[in-house]
Image (cartoon, coloured by chain):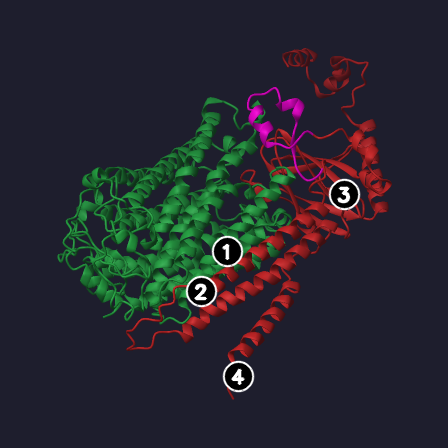
Amino acid sequence: MKIPSSIWTLLIGIVLTLVSLWYGQNHGLLPVAASNEATLVDGLFNTMMIVSTGIFLIVEGVLIYCAFKYRRRSGDETDGPPVYGNIPLEILWTAIPAVIVLGISIYSFEVYNSMGGFDPHGGHGSPMQHQSMKMPGAAIAATLSDTPQPDRSIIAQNVNPQEQAQASALEVNVTGLQYAFIFTYPETGVVSGELHVPIGQEVVLNMSANDVIHAFWVPEFRLKQDIIPGRETQIRFTPKTKGDYAVVCAELCGPYHGAMRTQVIVQTPEEFEQWQQEQLVASREELSTAVAAKPDDMDADKFLAPYIQDMGIQPEIVTHLHHQH
Amino acid sequence: MTQAQIQENANIPARIEEPGERKWQDYFTFNTDHKVIGIQYLVTTFIFYCIGGVLADLVRTELRTPDVDFVDPEVYNSLFTLHATIMIFLWIVPAAAGFANFLVPLMIGARDMAFPRLNALAFWMIPPAGILLIISLVIGDAAQAGWTSYPPLSLVTGQVGEGIWIMSILLLGTSSILGALNFLVTILKMRIPSMGVHQMPLFCWAILATSALALISTPVLAGALILLAFDLFAGTAFFNPTGGGDPVVYQHMFWFYSHPAVYIMILPFFGVISEVIPVHSRKPIFGYKAIAYSSLAISFLGLIVWAHHMFTSGIPGWLRMFFMITTMIIAVPTGIKIFSWLGTMWGGKLRLNSAMLFAMGFVGTFVIGGISGVMLAAVPFDIHVHDTYFVVAHLHYVLFGGSVLGIYAGFYQWFPKMTGRMLNETWGKVHFALTIVGLNMTFLPMHKLGLMGMNRRIAQYDPKYTFLNEICTYGAYLLAVSTFPFIINVIWSWMYGEKAPNNPWKALTLEWMTSSPPAIENFHKLPVLATGPYDYGLENASQGVPLESSDPVLSAGPNSVLRADPDEPYPTIAAQKEEGQPTSDS
């Protein structure tokens, strides 16, 4: 029985669609989604994967089909049919990709907006105005940067209660340096080499670099932001899945770039609170018993005197050293 | 009579029967013959390709295991920096210039390029630049800041290596600018009078678009590197944040060139593929004008997408959206080309020789790089995979699966014309099979590595990625092995291969209308177009069309048959300039 080609086309189309839809959801290429933003990004990626699988299969299918079906038979030295083009077909294969990329653009725009990309505080960096405006090169830099950050108090007056709740995000200052991240919690003064964050609360990282460009990346959060010396950059996310994830420096920062990694620990709010207390206690105890805690009313020579005698060093040497610096 | 015979017969008066003979010494001199320069380019760049390939395999050997156990981390950074620099600036960009040099004057029926001495000068800037880079590696102080060379890192990783790197790139950039200028003038001004722009082979269109792009963007890179050199040596602070400079400005300037560079590297090979596919499909190219103008569209759009390399660098949200949309739009003209090539093959009579296989391999693998490119354009997704192995996979599918396969297709297609000898087909097919397997084995797993969380430019990685990295490394070794059949085939065939006829593929473009290899001045008289560049299968349509049209330029068209007076003397370049012959659009 001869099946008409239109039915074959229809069948191939259906199979192609089903395979693309299935693979787009079951590719297994991404790690756990551990932040609210990650779920949004994964939705976008899966959609792109569906479209991509379809296009990939069509192109490879046509190539392989041509290689077998239209192979030149031996002894046939004639040319093929003189077909120069087909205007409707060409319009079709211009329009379809155009519609697809437009769709992906709109979807990306939506995702980016939901992630807070257009938030005046969010996602992107702004130069440290007070520092760079007076310096040479600032004129060029200023044209390329965003408008200065508006004062927070003005924004806060106009937001509804729900947004106000979000505004009380956990702020963490991040310093990138060769080859480590340092996390400082300004509210409590905790300083840590690992990032601890509570589930469900929005986190804002204010990031700055000491030496070269670094980048903060947590694959499970699907978020990345360069940390650039001379400016402050920001990133926002809301962790949603408990666990330990790698924090990776993603921008080449020197020979040991590959070793610049640490962890982000997503905890319940109680555990997070407990961790903060432990850190505070640890640092306070250290403060009172530390060898080098110098009371303000004593000058350095007097304070050091007993230790110097213990170590068998002449007091003059210390004085001499002290004044040299 | 087939179309190829019509074209050949019409060009008998133009043909020089004696094939061109060159002494081997000519290839080591400041020769102004575009064919010598073309071969100089191709051989030199292939040598650098082998060096860049060795560096790649050293990088992959380090990455076979998660620990740093093969080279020092500093050396590792130099290896990948030089791998990228060599592959881009000393292999793909100049290889395109090599093909363009050899082919463009022949395809448009000219005797040489517009500025032959400038042409030789542009070539002779390349070996010193390459040798400089190799020396920096040998003395153990090569650049370590990646081929992007972002400050402040590039300002603190070793002055000597960075200085040599800047010097070398400035030389190569200048060479590229001079070459681009030469191609533009040659293509616009030196076509035979009967060849309007719409009778030009698509390779010439591609080179036209590439040269315009190179001419506009390369000077910006030169500017950025000169400022970087000032920061490095004179202590200025254009980009150095410790003095108030802005490192992000460098990134803008760098990518203003380096994104168009991607199109500078791929457009010429779109042109090669547009030549190879119709010849071996024995069908006219599907949608000539769509392919020609999509090259120009890519060239233009390529200038306004650069900041998609900087989505995580701290640029404002609206700018991210602008660059996302322009980047997405580039997929449309690229898609037009891919579908047009498929349309050309559909219903043809495919001659599956090595050149055609590489061209089909190009379409099949480039499409993967194109698709991942659209994904990378989507800002939220790019933020996840920026600077990861996903990007490494993407760029290698574009530049290896695209450009390098295109270069190989070009080698197999025009080797008979360049040398007068045929290449061995069996070894060509072995080469093709090894290359396709090796390339997918090396680069396909990298997509997953990047998505899972492996960042790029690292010498050590999380042990959970070991298995996929081992596959990549063995694939890279296979790619190294795959070049041997090609190298041996080329050397053996060049010396002992079967003699090539003038037109072994029965093609219609003018380079096949002269002897193989072409005589020193290409054509005896002005060649003529008895048929368009892709008019395959028009045997019957060619009857009864008047050949003595009064104005050949106006009557020309891909479908029309036209023939200029074969006795017309060959005008010199100077005479052509004085007369101001109309060679513009029909």
Nearer to us of marks 4 and 2 is 2
Mark 1–mark 4 Cα distance, whole angstroms, equals 36 Å
Specify the colour of chain B: green
User: Where does label 1 land, which residue?
Assistant: B369
Residue A3's disc number: 4
Residue sitting at x 49%, y 57%: B335
In screen coordinates, is A17 left or right of B397?
Answer: right
Residue A9 belongs to magenta span: no
* Badge 2 amino acid: Asn
Q: Earlier in the sequence, mark 3 or mark 2?
A: 2
Query: Around disc 2, counting alpha carbons within 10 Å, would you say few (fewer than 14), some (14 to 19), or many (20 or more)?
Result: few
Magenta span = A122-148
Specify the colour of chain A: red
Query: Around disc 3, counting alpha carbons within 10 Å, would you say few (fewer than 14), some (14 to 19), or many (20 or more)?
Result: many
User: Where does label 3 land, which residue?
Assistant: A196
x and y, in percent, of residue B43 in the image: 29, 50
Circles 3 and 2 on the same subunit:
yes
Q: Secondary structure at mark 3?
A: strand
x and y, in percent, of residue A83 in the image: 38, 67
User: Where does label 2 land, which residue?
Assistant: A86
